[in-house]
Structures are given as C-alpha cells and as structure tokens.
Amino acid sequence: MRASFWLAGTAVVGIASLPAIAQQAAQPTAPTQPAPATAPAPQPANPATAVQPGGEPVASSRPRQTPAAPAEGDSGVAELGADELPPPPPPIEMPDESRRDPRVVGRLDPADFGLATTPWGAANGPMLSVLLRRMDAPLASRWAHIALRNALLARAPAPRLVNPVDWVAERAWLLLRMGEADAARMLVSGVDVADFTPKMFQIAVQSALANGDAPGLCPLRDGLGKVEPKVAPMVDAMCASLSGEPESAAAQMESIRRRGRVGGIDLVLAEKVVGAGADTNRAVTVEWEPVQALNSWRFGLATATGMVPPERLINASSPQLRSWQARSPLLTAQQRLASARIAAGLGVFSSQALTDVYASIYDSTGPDELSDTDAWQLRVAYVGRDRDTRLSAMRRLWSLGGNSWDKEASRAVLGRAAARIAPSADLQGDAANLIASMLAAGLDRQAARWAAVVDDMDDAQADACWAMLALSAPQGVSVDVSNGRISSFIGRDNSPGKQRSALLVGALAGLGKISVDQLNDFNRRHGLRLERKTSWTQLIDAAADLDQGGTVLVLTGTGLQRQEWRDIPGLHLFHSVAALRKTGQDFSARMIAAEALART
C-alpha cells in the first residue's frame, strides 16, 4: 500500500530506500561550460540543479539602452538627439492562440505505444524527476532504451506537483544522456523561450551543442547570464557574427581573451564559429594535440563547423557522445559509421537508419574499392546469389567489433536479411545469430518460424534458440515451455550463478507463460533468488497496478542501469516484464526478455 500511495501522489517514499537507484545525482558526462585557461577539464553548471516547482522563468529580453545625445560636430551641423529620433517599433506580441501550452509537450501519441492517454497517471512528479535525473545511461537493454525514449517523447500532461517546463527539461536531459540528441531537441523546441526556466535554459544549451547547432544557441542568449555565465559572452560573440555583425563579434572575442576566464581549445573553437560568419576575415587554426578529452562544448562547436576531432578523442568519448556524432549532418557517412554502429547498438538508431548509413557509403565508393567494404558485404547478405553466399557475408558482419553494442548493431542491420533464410536444423551453427538478428529488428513472427526445427538441433544450439523463441513468440505461436524443457535448459546452463536460468524463468513468469507455482518451484530448487522484495519491486508493481505505463518504463530503466546484461539480476527482469505486460506493452516486454537471453 505504501508504494501505491506514493504513485498516487498521496505519500512520500524516500528515494534513499531504493537500492537500485540510491546514488548520487549523475553529473553531466559532457559539460557545457568551457574550461578556464588554467584548467584542462571544465566543470559544468549542473543542469540537474533543483528548481522549485512554479519558479519564475528568466526574462527573455534585455532592456534597450537609450543612446546619449551627441554633441554638435565640428561641421557645425547638429545631430539628432535621442529625443528627436523616431520611436522604436513596438515589440511584437505573440497572440494567445499561437502560444504553446508548456503543460503538454511531446511528439508521440502515447496511445500508439500502449501508454494510454495519461502515462504518468497521478504519480508524484518530483519523485519521477529524481528518477530521471539519477538514471545512469546507457541501459543494458536496447529495447528498453527504445521504449523509454518513446515514453519520454509522449505528448501527455506533466505529472502532479512539478513545474511543467522543468519536467520537459528533465526528460530532455535524460534523452541527451541516452544519446538521443534529436529527440531532446524535439522536446526543447516544444516550449516557447518566453516560458523557459533556468533549468530549461541549461538543457537547451546542452541540446544545441549535442546537435552541433551553434545558431540554436542564439535564441537563448538573454537567459544565459545567470545560468551559464562563462558561456554567455562567447555565445553573444558567435551570434553577433552569425547575424552579420563581424565588428561587434571581434570586439567581444577580444574582450573575452583579455579577461582570461576562458582559453585554450574552448576559446579557439568559439573563434572558429565567429570566423564562419560573413565578412569576418578570420582564419582560425585549431590545434587538438594538447586536448585530452571531448566535452559537449568542444564536440558541439567542432561539429557545427564541419570539423572531426581526432580519432583518439572520439574513441575515448562516451557512447552517448558517439551517438550524437552519428547523426551529425555535416559529416560524411564514412566519418559517422563507427559511431552509427554504437548508436544502433544502444537503440538510438533503428536497423533501417544504420542500413541507410551503409547505403550512403556504398553509393560514394568507387567500383574498384567496393568489394573490400562492409557496405558491400551488407548488400551481399541481402541479395547474394545463394544461401551460402548470403550467410558468408552475414558471418563477416556478425564478427565485427569488440563490444556488445557493435555486435547488437550487426544483428539489427541484418534483421531482414536473416528473415530471408529458410529455417533448417542444418544451420544450427548460425541459427542463434539469425534469430537474434530478426528479434533485434523486431521481426518476432519471422523468428518464430524457427521453433519448428529447434528440436532437431544439438542441445547447446537448441537451448540458445529455444530460449529466445520461448520468450519472443507472439500470441498464437506455440513454443514448448513445459517443466521438462525448462529443467533441461537449467541443467545445461553453466553461466555464473545460473544467471541465464534466472533471467529465463523470471521472464517466462513475467510474460505469463508459466504459473506462479512453477516459478516458485524452479526458484526453490535452483536458488534463482526471484522471490525477493525490494522498494524497487514494490514501486514498479504498484505502478503497473495503477496502469501508469510511463512510470513503469522509467522504473524499468532504473532496474536496468548497467551496460551489460550479465550484471542484471533475474529479479529485475521478472518484475519489469510483468509490469510492462500488465500495462499493455506486450511487444516491448517480449523483446526485452528475448534480448536478455540473446546477449548473455
């Protein structure tokens, strides 16, 4: 009952009691503020700084200064004084019908994703904000990432007891930390600048930098003085140049340099943007050698001017920043490919988006060089002359990369190619990758065709395929989930602590494919630790009981705060899948469950 009351907004549950989320508020992985001249690593103004609900927005216009009347010149001709000048035009007022309601901001219809019309229900807004702010991205699950992104983009009323503009800022900030630069910009652009709070100004700066959009900083200038004091003068200078005022921009940059608060690469990149303006006659050389790390300021301004930072800095960057680079329009497809694969592995890019990157590389590569490219191998995987030729190309692509995101990207981009391979027990060596590829692309019905040949495979290959199919099979598709079949899987499972068995049994129970009695029996006999109750399990169960689909997804993300599935307890998958299914999100539940077995 305690969790139910909290989710209904009538009681307070201490966040410190949640073992999965009781952590320090995440610091921005890519700080906004450039470093002072004496410090190589800048400290950001934390966009997660608390703002009281209902706080007044920062004024969006600066007072106009009245120029002093000039004295009579030597020519003897008196110049017009300020009181003789024509009055300035009145400010343009936005009619009420053109203003956007900051209480309902989003781009997706929540009903299209099983979230009903009120995904947050009567949940406590400040507590949801804390959950978003403390979430450590990226998540272990690609499909959980996709579902959570859709929930954050849902066009739905803000939850209770929270400033609606700050709520948009919290959603956008989490999306940025997930690598979702475009999604964050969608939310930020859905709020009128006149309604911005200090927190929203900070996140809007981060969003513009993540998108490599230097002109996007200009509408924010009037609100940056208090929230980003180091950035504000450089933004003024860059925007002056971009608006055709090169003399003003040059004077402001000289003033910044003279004060010495900002220097090094951070100042040079700002000068590079200033030099990109019209009639500046400023040639700026950027020296990357002394730079030890990228942050959002360095990435954003470099990307805005079409520069690619050195490979050593890109490779050392967070996967979120790599995802930002993957969608940079000023870079070539080849320059974006490595980052695009990471973005696809995380869930930022769809399988089709990664296919489009390869298609661009294919189109821009000369015929003599094509055969050595992965773009050519992808084409062969789809249209090779026979099955063996196509499978050979798939194996080459499956072997790419050394991390789990690269491997999942290869699976996702090969999903439709895998669906063209007819099921056969003769292919048991490739069957697990073929099924995992189809599921990574969301092709659950095509993957289910392999259920008919699993029993003809050797035990090890059969177990890997059966587990994915048992969890992903849609309604109407029969897959054996008898006690004997599950026991055989558990008996052959050699993962540490029977973790794969815990994930399997927990997910089967969460999806309703085995009964509670079966769950308890397997749990007792094999020590799977699925019976435990924590504050997190109580919260997500209560959110599901109250049909709060959005809250369930936030808590699912909270329960999957690891980069690898091997670090996720079966208990978390059990309750996440059960809550998703109960709130009408069956597809996401099945895909997350099957992914857990595919990636362990």
Image (cartoon, rainbow, N blue to C red):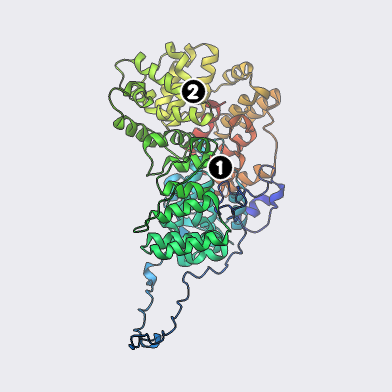
338 vs 491, left or right, is left
The nearer-to-camera label among 1 and 2 is: 1
Q: Find residue 442 and report its horizontal and vertical position in percent.
A: 43, 33
- Relative to residue 593, is residue 177 depicted above or below? below
Q: Find residue 336 and report its horizontal and vertical position in percent.
A: 41, 37
Q: Identify which amino acid the numbered label 2 is placed on.
A: Val
- Relative to residue 475, is residue 88 depicted above or below? below
Which quadrant does the C terminus fall into?
top right
Residue 116 visible (yes or no): no
Q: Nearer the viewer, residue 524 or 246?
A: 246
- Corner quadrant of residue 495: top right
Q: Residue at 33% across / 32% down in the picture?
A: 359
Q: Nearer the viewer, residue 258 or 480?
A: 258
- Relative to residue 573, is residue 458 depicted above or below? above
Q: Identify which amino acid the numbered label 1 is placed on.
A: Pro
Within-10-Å neighbours for mark 1: few <14, some 14–19, many 20+: few
Q: Name the residue that disc number 2 marks.
A: 479
- The circle drawn on residue 275 is none
Q: Name the residue that disc number 1 marks.
A: 290
Q: Find residue 434 and report its horizontal and vertical position in percent.
A: 43, 22
